[in-house]
Amino acid sequence: MTDDTYVHALTIPIEFGGRTVSITPTAVETDDGLILVDAGPEPATDRLETALADVGFGFDDVERVILTHHDADHAGGLAALRDHTDVTIGAHPAEIPHLTGDEMPVKGPDDDRYPPVPVDEELTDGEEFSTRAGPLRVVETPGHTAGHISLSLPDERLLLAGDALVADEAESLSGPKPAYTVDEDRAANSVASLAELDVEHVICHHGGYAPCGSDRIHAIAASLQDGD
């Protein structure tokens, strides 16, 4: 990725389990503003604002949020973001009830959920958005949650993996974490489907940018299918 890229990995430090870790929402430039892929957790809105400012943007530039899934570290900050700007929110149909408050999130305590938000768009496999980096394409990758999606930028050979892959392990890119995966078999199948894409580099929500692509994803898929 170069300094003149239209895709911006936004590194945000958060406290988790008594230590500081980072998450990576991603902003993609369009002719109408920014598409923000995931919003981060509820307490981190000010840090999201700082991360956007670091790449020359503000909340007013965000015109759409695409959620990879409804977990709190991805969607918890949506209500606070909407306090700053009127954004269009999109998610897979299986995730929407958890976002709107009709159903509780599948992870986390039942008595402590983030503020619900309305969802404007249902996103399914193959849907595309026009960006300055070329088409941004929805790829259904269920397993981590029932309606998890990833986003492909084929012109950039770039995959925004959400939590379908992680980049914060010893390897530069690894498979989904079993402890946080609702359906490990479906998650493994999703990695196999990602391996069929022409990918040169990946941005993961956990770990950020990974300078590896299809060959590494193929290896991860094979490992998961072998049960390693």
Image (spheres, rainbow, N blue to C red):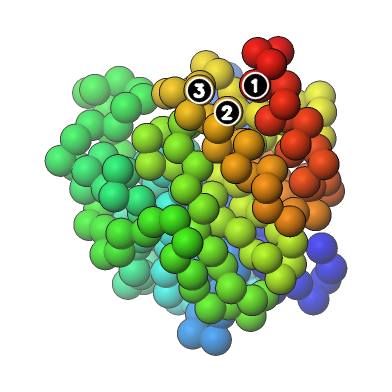
How far from the left and from the top, in percent, is residue 118? 22, 57
Residue beneath disc 2: 188
How far from the left and from the top, in percent, is residue 208? 70, 45
Which residue is pictured at 55% across the width and 86% down the height? 31
Quick check: marks 2 and 1 in contact, CB under 8 Å?
Answer: yes
Real-space Cα separation, disc 2 to disc 3, in angstroms: 5 Å
Q: Helix, strand or loop at disc 2? A: helix
Q: Helix, strand or loop at disc 1? A: helix
Real-space Cα separation, disc 2 to disc 1, in angstroms: 7 Å
Of the pair 13 and 76, the residue shown nearer to us: 76
**Mark 3 or 1, nearer chain start:** 3
Quick check: marks 2 and 3 in contact, CB under 8 Å?
Answer: yes
Whether residue 164 can be seen here: no
Relative horizontal placement of residue 227, taking residue 83 as reference (left or right): right
Of the pair 69 and 140, the residue shown nearer to us: 140
How far from the left and from the top, in percent, is residue 131? 58, 77
